[in-house]
Amino acid sequence: MLNPFEQYKKTSVNTMTKGELLILLFDEAIKKLNQSKILLDNSDYNNASIMLEKTRKIFNHLIVTLDDNYAISKELEDMYRFFITQTIKASAMKSSEYIDDILPMIKEFRDTWAEADKITRTSKN
């Protein structure tokens, strides 16, 4: 049996729109990348690798959920794979510079999806 907080989180996720879930995933990736930067800069390579692996899982999830019926899906997949590659490099090279390279792009993706979700919601009303 889930405790009340866990039940609330599960219900919240299950009632989110696809746009809200996408934004949540990007927010989580950004959070994990920022944590990884701090950990790498403090030479805590083990925990940085754990955070970077969690980030890779987010982008892998985004890849497998892409709809191949849209032309943009291939471009998104390529970009998500680039993000994954950069996190692998950051972990292997023990350097936050690879995170610095992708973090602004990921934030821009997040903001773009948030704006698209907002437009979609207002057009439905």
Image (cartoon, rainbow, N blue to C red):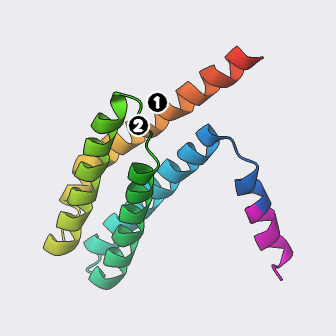
Residue 74 to residue 91: above or below = above
Which residue position is annotated with label 2?
109
Tag 2: amino acid: Phe
Name the quadrant containing residue 89: bottom left
**Mark 2 falls on what kind of element?**
helix
Whether the residues at callouts 1 and 2 have beta carbons within 8 Å, the answer is yes
Residue 16 x %, y %? 71, 46
Q: Is residue 78 above or below residue 72?
A: below
In the picture, the quarter occupied by the N terminus is bottom right
Which residue bears the numbered disc 1?
112
Residue type beneath disc 1: Thr
Q: Secondary structure at mark 1?
A: helix
Q: Residue at x 27, y 71 (%)?
A: 41
User: How far across and down, in percent of the image, does residue 111 sit?
Assistant: 48, 34
Write the start and end of the magenta stretch as one range. Answer: 1-10
Name the residue at 28% across, 58% down: 84
> Seen in the image, is 61 located left or right of residue 4?
left
Relative placement, left or right, of 122 versus 23 is: right
The quadrant holding residue 76 is top left
